[in-house]
């Protein structure tokens, strides 16, 4: 256990569905992140939140919508996804941005059918 | 882009041997980090080396950093079958919280 918990672990959704991924950190960190990991590609940073404020949006399509209601919780709302969005979605947290190590959750394996 | 690029892409060794993985990047960094990932799971932080450091040790891990060549290496000594995983380097620069990962090296250690 890294102190970062993601739910659900697996998700299968149709292209017209709306679903949300949840991430919770129990480490008292002030920054949280969403990463996407696709086969044969490097991890792609999607969003960065610092003190509940989004500080980075890495040109992610609007069908992905993040929400950070407080410093311990991070959501990724999904709607009208495409099959190419199937991937492992990883949440991470850290203290002080990239100056210290990041702690990752176990990920949500998303399949869009 | 300051994306890290690992070399080799895959490495297969016998238990007890040493494993060396290399990482190159393109722009100035604040620090460089190495992570490990078991199949389909989250990443686990292994070691962080700051731009003003040249070498760092942690147990069986040894990391070097050469900022003039923009490269780093991770050495795992006396490897074990349990070390089988993917290993990633990640660079941290000036953009807040932006860790940029390489493609990773898949390490297989045969018992």
Image (cartoon, rainbow, N blue to C red):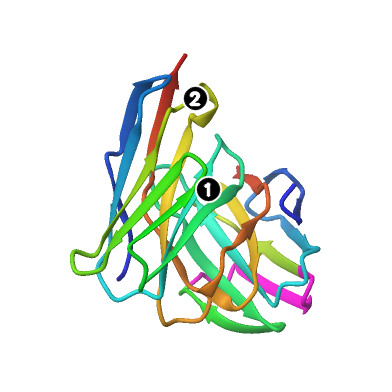
Q: Which residue occupies 74% across, 76% down?
A: A68
Circles 1, 2 touching at the beta carbon (< 8 Å):
no
Q: Residue furthest top?
A: B111
Residue designated by label 1 = A83
Q: Is residue A80 visible?
A: no
Position above or below: B56 against A97? above
Tag shown at residue B74: none
Q: Residues within 10 Å of mark 2 (few under 14, many from 20)?
A: some
Q: Position of residue B22 (x, y in %)?
A: 29, 48
Seen from this angle, which residue lies furthest left?
A: B69
Q: Specify the subunit that label 1 lies on.
A: A
Residue at the image point whose x is 76% and y is 60% from the top? A22
Find numbered disc 2 in the image and state the secondary structure of the residue it sits on: loop
- In the image, which residues are magenta? A60-73
Residue visible at 66% across and 66% down in the picture: A93
Determine if the magenta segment contains residue A71.
Answer: yes
Q: Nearer the viewer, residue B26 or B79?
A: B79
Label 1 sits on a secondary structure element that is: helix
- Residue under numbered circle 2: B80
Using the rendered view, name the quadrant where residue B53 is placed.
Answer: bottom left
Image quarter in which the C terminus of chain A is found = top right
Q: Chain of mark 2?
A: B
Q: Residue at x 27, y 73 (%)?
A: B27
The picture places residue A71, in percent across and down from the top left corner, at 77, 77
Where B81 falls versus B4 (above or below)? above
Residue A26 visible in rendering: yes
Q: Nearer the viewer, mark 1 or mark 2?
A: 2
Distance of label 1 from label 2 (alpha carbons): 38 Å
Q: Nearer the viewer, residue A9 or A93?
A: A93
Q: Position of residue B66 (x, y in %)?
A: 25, 63
A25 falls in the magenta region: no
Q: Is residue A110 above or below residue B25?
A: above
């Amino acid at each position: 256990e890294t102190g970062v918990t993601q739910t659900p672990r697996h998700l299968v959704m149709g292209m017209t569905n709306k679903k949300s991924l949840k991430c919770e950190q129990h480490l008292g960190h002030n920054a949280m992140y969403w990463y996407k990991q696709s086969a044969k590609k490097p991890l792609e940073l999607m969003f960065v939140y610092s003190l509940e404020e989004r500080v980075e949006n890495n040109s992610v399509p609007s069908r992905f919508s993040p929400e950070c209601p407080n410093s311990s919780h991070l959501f990724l709302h999904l709607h009208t996804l495409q099959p190419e969005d199937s991937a492992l979605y990883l949440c991470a947290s850290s203290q002080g941005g990239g100056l210290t190590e990041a702690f990752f959750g176990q990920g949500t394996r998303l399949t869009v059918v | 882009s300051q994306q890290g690029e690992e070399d080799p892409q895959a490495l297969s060794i016998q238990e007890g041997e040493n494993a060396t993985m290399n990482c190159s990047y393109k722009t100035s960094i604040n620090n460089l980090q190495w992570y490990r990932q078991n199949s389909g799971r989250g990443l686990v932080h292994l070691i962080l080396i700051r731009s003003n450091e040249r070498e760092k040790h942690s147990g069986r891990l040894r990391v070097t950093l050469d900022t003039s060549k923009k490269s780093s290496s991770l050495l795992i000594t006396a490897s074990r079958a349990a070390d089988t995983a993917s290993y990633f380097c990640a660079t941290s620069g000036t953009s807040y919280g932006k860790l940029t990962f390489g493609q990773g090296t898949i390490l297989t250690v045969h018992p």
